Amino acid sequence: GNSVTQMEGPVTLSEEAFLTINCTYTATGYPSLFWYVQYPGEGLQLLLKATKADDKGSNKGFEATYRKETTSFHLEKGSVQVSDSAVYFCALRGGSQGNLIFGKGTKLSVKP
Amino acid sequence: DAGVTQSPTHLIKTRGQQVTLRCSPKSGHDTVSWYQQALGQGPQFIFQYYEEEERQRGNFPDRFSGHQYPNYSSELNVNALLLGDSALYLCASSLGGRSYNEQFFGPGTRLTVL
């Protein structure tokens, strides 16, 4: 069945450091891929998405490229800020039903 | 523009009890999906309601049931609570009954089963 695997956390970085959070997926067909962010005490917010191979999603300085050949959708940001501290979830949507399937989440802490 | 709202924020129950969680979708949305997020895990899809009917269901037992009202608000009911039902329950709304439309999430209800 469809599944998402993302790197274990927590990840602790200093402000202005480069961020990569790895995400790989298993799916039949051509799923859409997403990154969601969850700030403390809040619900999930869509950060970015890509709907087909080689698409790059981007938002708020974050980027991720849909790589079909490596079944990956790694999240990157060139310079993180303290305000980026949150839990990040990689997700896919595919199959006959189309509901979201999430990874376990990666907690990011950015220190000043 | 009101986003997705959920009530209550927190809830404590004991094993064997029943619980009802409530969700009001984002203004203009007519579809509600429910997810369970256990501690340290990603959300898992429970079911989706559209036009007052359950349209899709994840791998959850019949103890989990729901309802959607004509105003599109929704309830999640869990019977015979188990310790393992302790989790954050998230509601997400979207438009048009199609899962590929963007889902907007509420802040969740934290359920603790003792």
Image (cartoon, helix red, strand yellow):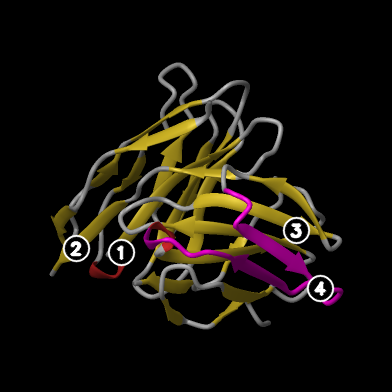
* Front: mark 1 or 4: 4
Packing grade of label 1 (10 A; few <14, some 14-19, many >=20) is some
Question: How far separated are the C-alphas under marks 4 and 2?
Answer: 43 Å
Q: Is residue A65 left or right of residue B69?
A: left
Which residue is nearer to you in this view: B103 or A68? Answer: B103
Question: Any mark on residue B69, and which?
Answer: 4
Question: How far separated are the C-alphas under marks 3 and 2?
Answer: 38 Å
Indicate the position of residue B66 as horizontal and vertical percent values: 69, 63
Whether the magenta-drawn stretch holds residue A87 is answered as: no
Which residue is nearer to you in this view: A77 or B19? Answer: B19
Q: Residue at x 48, y 62 (%)?
A: A44
Packing grade of label 4 (10 A; few <14, some 14-19, many >=20) is few
- Residue type at mark 1: give it: Asp
Name the chain under label 4: B
Question: Any mark on residue A84, and which?
Answer: 1
Q: Residue furthest front?
A: B16
Upstream in sequence: badge 2 or badge 1: 1
Classify mark 2: helix, strand or loop.
strand
* Front: mark 4 or 2: 4
Whether label 2 touches label 1, CB < 8 Å = yes
Question: How far separated are the C-alphas under marks 2 and 1?
Answer: 7 Å
Q: Residue at x 39, y 55 (%)?
A: A61
Q: Is residue B9 left or right of residue A14?
A: right
According to the picture, the residue beneath numbered tag 3 turns out to be B49
Q: Quadrant of residue A90?
A: top left
Name the chain under label 3: B
Indicate the position of residue B97 as horizontal and vertical percent values: 79, 53
Whether the magenta-drawn stretch holds residue B71 is answered as: yes
Q: Which residues are magenta?
A: B61-83
According to the picture, the residue beneath numbered tag 2 turns out to be A110
